[in-house]
Image: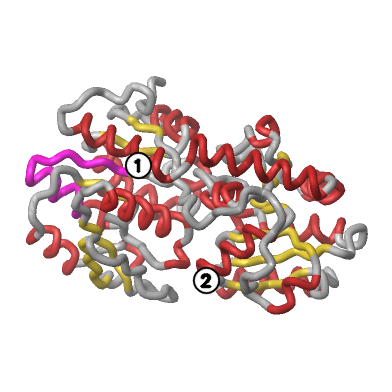
Amino acid sequence: MQGIFSPEHGGPTFSLANYCRGQVARGHQVSLRVLEGYPHSSPALRLEPPVDMGVDRVDRPARLGGSAAMRARLRADPTPEIYHLHGVWLRAMHYGAEEARRRGRPYVVELMGAYERYARLQKGLQKRVARWWFQDALLHQASCLHVNSEKEARELRELGFRVPIAVIPVGTDLGDANDDGGPRPSTDTPPHPAITEKRFVLYLARIHRNKGIELLINAWANVEKEFPDYRLVIAGSGTEEYVQACQRMIERGGLADSCLWLGQVSEEGKKWLYRHAECYVLPSYSENFGNTVAEALAAGTPVIITPNTVWTHLPREGCGWLSQTTDDSLTTTLTEALRTDPAQRQSMGRRGRQLIEDRYSSDKVIDQIDRLYRWLLGGPEPTDILFHG
């Protein structure tokens, strides 16, 4: 189950789609239950059979994520072996847990960073009410909590959750990311005709304050004159108010000629951007996992990240750079990245691609999820993925 499954919801939508397809490929029966009809959101992504896809309308007020239609659908569904709830805060997750308890089946909750400190502070009053009303009880009664990093697991323990916690990263689909860090292909179609005029640095994620995009715009203003053969490409969607505020920053800074704002791009467009970027930048203030970092690395592109992600090991792996979340630090890091010899950047990209193959591929992650399910159904304990802190 996932409460929001629109393309602009970003990484969770596409990672869950990959999970479903991967499980089906292994011969498992998968039923996916999601909501749509949120204001300013496109319809839910539809997965092809044999995934059993059920989409219901969200009730008003949509921010609660409730749906009488979904509740009725879950009540009528055949009994599965296990329920996996992707997300928190929405009433839809409560319906899944309620149904699992009614039928005596285990349920897993993937939190996707929802209880990390930075996330809890956003809309803090609403979240405190939700925790008191239903959310904390849902977690305490779960068979297992699924998190993407040990950092997230530690924070849950500090908050008093004692149920088992499985640390399983987000899987990255390598099927379409076939760039090995060598010469960039020239026969595919770019998402914008002007993008081929210069080399470019890429930001591709939600347009949100949490992502540090204002830091990136300020840092780009500090480096763009030194690198006239480069431009900054910004892709992603966000609220109209915040998008316009960022675009005004670019105009006020005189950066219109060196910044290309693409907005939401297609999946094919994303793949093109990842493959052709000289480096990818995600200067987040807080990041549960950072799917886009894995996608960029899988495409053979080195990455600039901050200490607020799970990717701080990239400099040690030789496939990225680490910046603090300040204008000065990001300016220095961007300068270092763009002064790096292109051949060395390609070598970094090859190491990044290998890192994803070795540790973060969808196949490896689905293996871990399978072993977690089998344990919850009475099989051997997967000690390598259970958090022991």
Q: Which residues are magenta?
A: 95-109
Q: Tell me: residue 295, above or below residue 317.
A: below
Q: Which mark is residue 157?
A: none
Q: Quadrant of residue 2?
A: bottom left
What is the quadrant of the C terminus in the image?
A: top left
Question: In the rendered structure, which amino acid carries the disc numbered 2?
Answer: Ser
Residue displayed at 52% across by 71% down: 266
**Residue carrying label 1:** 366
Residue 282: give x, y in percent of width and height: 64, 51
Give the image quarter of residue 383.
top left
Between 289 and 265, which is closer to the camera in this rendering?
265
- Please state the horizontal and vertical placement of residue 303, each as a whole percent of the image: 67, 47
Image x and y of residue 100, in percent: 14, 46
Mark 1: amino acid: Ile
Number of on-image labels: 2
Query: In the rendered view, would you say 312 is above or below 118?
Result: above
In terms of secondary structure, what is the magenta stretch mainly? helix
* Numbered label attached to residue 266: 2
**Above-or-below relation of 102 to 355:** below
Secondary-structure class at tag 2: loop
Residue 132 placement, left or right of 243: left
Which quadrant holds the N terminus?
bottom left
